[in-house]
Image (cartoon, rainbow, N blue to C red):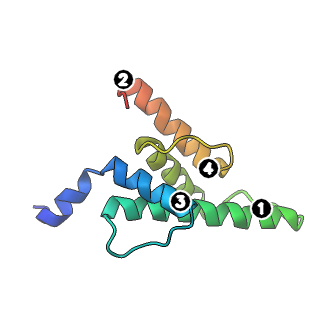
Amino acid sequence: MIHPGLAALEKWDTIEYAAGYRARLAAIPDSEIAHHCWRCGWEDADTEALELDRHNRVLAHGGEDDYAETGGLLFDAGGDARANGVPFDECRTQPWKEGWIAADINVGLAGIED
């Protein structure tokens, strides 16, 4: 049996998730008292923003980078973003875009409307 407190986390609050995502991109600090979904959105956006910055630095120094260590996390963050109403953005990492698109295709196949 799932603990009642954990059961509540199985259904994400998409408004909170999207708000947390936007807050991270607007440089609003993380809050320990924030709603769980807000924090998930903030943390996904944080991962994506930090990885994009790291990736751009590697390329600027002539290196190659294919997100070998974080590709899965970024893909999942993109999928979570799509599922929770965060719009597609060209200024994201390639794995994030792929996760967003994969989730978008699944939404279309399932006939789910926003």
| Residue 45 badge | 3
| Front residue of 66 and 84 | 84
Mark closest to the chain's N terminus, 2 or 3: 3
Crowdedness near tag 1: few (<14), some (14–19) or many (≥20) residues, C-alpha within 10 Å: some
Mark closest to the chain's N terminus, 4 or 1: 1
Which residue position is annotated with label 4?
A: 95
Element type at mark 3? helix
Mark closest to the chain's N terminus, 4 or 3: 3
Question: Real-space Cα distance between discs 3 and 1?
Answer: 16 Å
| Residue 56 badge | 1
| Front residue of 19 and 90 | 19
Q: Considering the image in quadrants, where does the N terminus appear?
A: bottom left
Q: Can residue 108 be seen at all in this image of the molecule?
A: yes
Which residue position is annotated with label 2?
A: 111
Mark closest to the chain's N terminus, 1 or 2: 1
Q: How many marks?
A: 4
Q: Is residue 106 above or below residue 63?
A: above
